[in-house]
Image: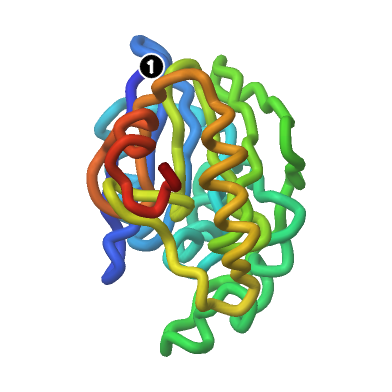
């Protein structure tokens, strides 16, 4: 499996293009901004079919290029049910509070915890990790995790936004994620790649 990391927008949110080596099909995680930049990467890697767009959550800096990417590729948009309203509400996705405006977009697949979606020949498992937003999820594909803003390298997402919940967040970090028994390679929503067990050991936001 190949993962191409593309930092987008003023928030430098990470978008990912994911495909099997030798395949012309791929899926995208979190097209936050700069649709043209993401489409240029799709062309560069000779991807002919983007099957799905997976959203780790619905904040504007992770969905800003969603409508353009869906229109350009025909990919199916996937988001957890608790963040569904963010696709069409500038208030819910926080764009209205940040001085930006993004195009609205409808979901094709509304996700729940434990769902497995076949995308570009790969099985993508949904792990619901609420707290940063009600519908925050991590996606797991083989030995790789896409964590969105659930956690980063030695840090974690904010819990002071509308729809955030510190108690849910604590449970997500220290019960849901701690229950995972694989040391996943983790591609985060901002910043650099890490590993799950490395975060367990060193990230101060995980309880000891």
Q: Position of residue 115 (x, y in %)?
A: 73, 31
- Identify the image quadrant of residue 165: bottom right
> Which residue is painted at 39% across and 56% down in the image?
156
Residue 169 vs residue 98, the one in the foreground: 169
> Which residue is painted at 54% across and 26% down in the image?
180
Q: How many marks?
A: 1
Quarter containing the N terminus: top left
Answer left or right for 202 relative to 51: left
How was the colour assigned to the protein in this rendering? rainbow
Instruction: Identify whether 136 is placed above or below 27.
Output: below
Q: Position of residue 70 (x, y in %)?
A: 56, 50
Residue 182 vs residue 111, the one in the foreground: 182
- Identify the image quadrant of residue 126: top right
Answer left or right for 4 relative to 117: left
Q: Is residue 43 visible?
A: no
Q: Position of residue 148 (x, y in %)?
A: 45, 49
> Which residue is painted at 57% across and 66% down in the image?
166
- Identify the image quadrant of residue 112: top right
> Which residue is painted at 51% across and 70% down in the image?
159
Q: Mark 1 falls on what kind of element?
A: loop
Q: Which residue is mark 1?
A: 1
Q: Is residue 25 visible?
A: yes
Q: Position of residue 187 (x, y in %)?
A: 35, 38
Instruction: Identify whether 177 is placed above or below 172.
Output: above
Instruction: Identify whether 26 is placed above or below 23.
Output: below
Residue 21 vs residue 157, the one in the foreground: 157
């Amino acid at each position: 499996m190949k993962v191409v990391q593309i930092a987008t927008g003023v928030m430098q949110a990470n978008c990912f293009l994911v495909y099997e080596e030798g395949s012309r099909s791929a899926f995208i995680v979190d097209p936050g901004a700069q649709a043209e930049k993401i489409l240029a990467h799709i062309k560069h890697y000779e991807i002919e079919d983007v099957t799905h767009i997976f959203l780790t959550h619905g904040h504007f800096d992770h969905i800003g290029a969603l409508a353009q990417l869906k229109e350009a590729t025909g990919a199916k948009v996937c988001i957890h049910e608790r963040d569904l309203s963010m696709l069409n509400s500038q208030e819910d996705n926080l764009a209205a509070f940040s001085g930006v405006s993004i195009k609205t977009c409808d979901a094709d697949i509304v996700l729940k915890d434990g769902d497995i979606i076949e995308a570009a020949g790969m099985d993508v498992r949904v792990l619901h990790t609420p707290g940063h937003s009600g519908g925050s999820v991590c996606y797991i594909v083989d030995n790789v995790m896409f964590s969105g803003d659930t956690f980063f390298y030695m840090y974690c997402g904010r819990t002071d936004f509308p729809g955030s919940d510190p108690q849910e967040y604590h449970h997500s970090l220290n019960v849901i994620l701690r229950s995972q028994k694989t040391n996943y390679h983790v591609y985060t929503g901002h910043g650099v790649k890490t590993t799950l067990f490395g975060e367990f050991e060193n990230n101060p936001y995980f309880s000891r």
